[in-house]
Amino acid sequence: MKETKEAFSLRVRRFEERLLREMKNIFVPVHLSLGQEWVAAEIWENIQPADFLFSTHRNHHMYFAKGGDEKKLWDEIMGLPGGLNQGFAGSQGISDAEINFHASAIVGGLVGVAAGTAYALKADGAKAIAVCCVGDGGTEAGVFWEAANWSALNALPIAFICENNGMSVDSPIAERQYGALNPKAGAFGLWVARSVKHALELAREGKPSFYEAKVKLECEHIYLGAMLPKEVIA
Ligand SMILES: Cc1ncc(C[n+]2csc(CCOP(=O)(O)OP(=O)(O)O)c2C)c(N)n1
Ligand SMILES: [Mg+2]
């Protein structure tokens, strides 16, 4: 029997809570997804193996959504040789080409790559889509709107999923952006979706889409664990 979305979310949450407990032994910056698991659960339910999933510095839940290997993810974050990227990339740079999953520490860093991937999929006549996750802060990278324009112009099979937790580090969205996200996405020619599922369905029809997932991050923006001076973590 297939795992339920609730069980999936719980599995992600347990993983993140385990990391939190191990923080003193972690030597890379870590962004946890506590509170945002449901967005990954929706993607997990609707994404296909041939699809591509691009994520951000906050990516553990999305790696699970693409069917990632929990042990390899754990080892990567812990800096172990058995990790996905031999322990060199750390939490922010999770990538697993075997399952078409990539993430980047650079805010907006993979948005152009996602649009390019969608362009290639269309050119190849493939049925697969690209799913591009961004944070609300990620929509402030110029490349986001360039990619939106390019996707709309070429009717690319891409779904932009924005996990809007209202903050970019410690800066609230109301102090950074004029107006709401959906009308802006619509003005750039993206199809404004009602849900993650709808966004992926639209992308499969060659209608580049945008879905704003309003989320509440239930933890700190970042954890630096053992990177902090000893007197801070003692
Ligand atoms: C190009 C770039 N500028 C700045 C940073 C530093 N930085 C890391 S996370 C972050 C906030 C991003 O906010 P958002 O996209 O909303 O993601 P969230 O952390 O809220 O999930 C910033 C500014 C970065 N990693 N890359
Ligand atoms: Mg944010």
Image (cartoon, helix red, strand yellow):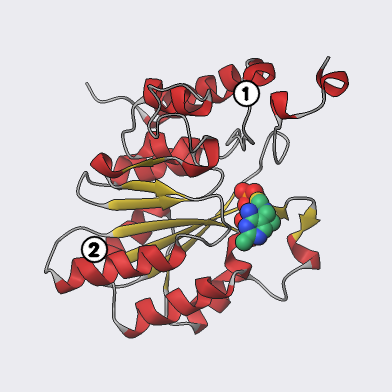
Residue 61 at least partly seen: yes
Outermost residue, left side: 125
204 in relation to 191, above or below: above
**Which residue is rendered at x = 23% and y = 46% of the image?**
48
The answer to whether 39 is drawn above or below residue 208 in the figure is: above
Eyeballing the image, is 103 above or below 145? above
Comparing 73 with 52, the one in front is: 73
Ligand 1 neighbours mark 1 (CB distance < 8 Å): no
- Residue 34: percent from the left, percent from the top? 60, 33
Front residue of this view, candidates 191 and 80: 80
Place of residue 106 in the rendered image (x, y in percent of width and height, measured from the top left): 56, 56
- Residue 111 lies in what quarter of the image? bottom left
Q: Which disc is residue 175 wearing?
A: none
Q: Nearer the viewer, residue 14 or 26?
A: 26
Disc 2: CA contacts within 10 A as few (<14), some (14-19) or many (>=20)? some
What is the quadrant of the C terminus in the image? top right
Q: CA distance from mark 2 to mark 1?
A: 39 Å
- Tag 2 residue: 204
- The amino acid sitting under disc 1 is Ile
Q: Nearer the viewer, mark 2 or mark 1?
A: 1
Residue at the image point whose x is 60% and y is 34% from the top: 32
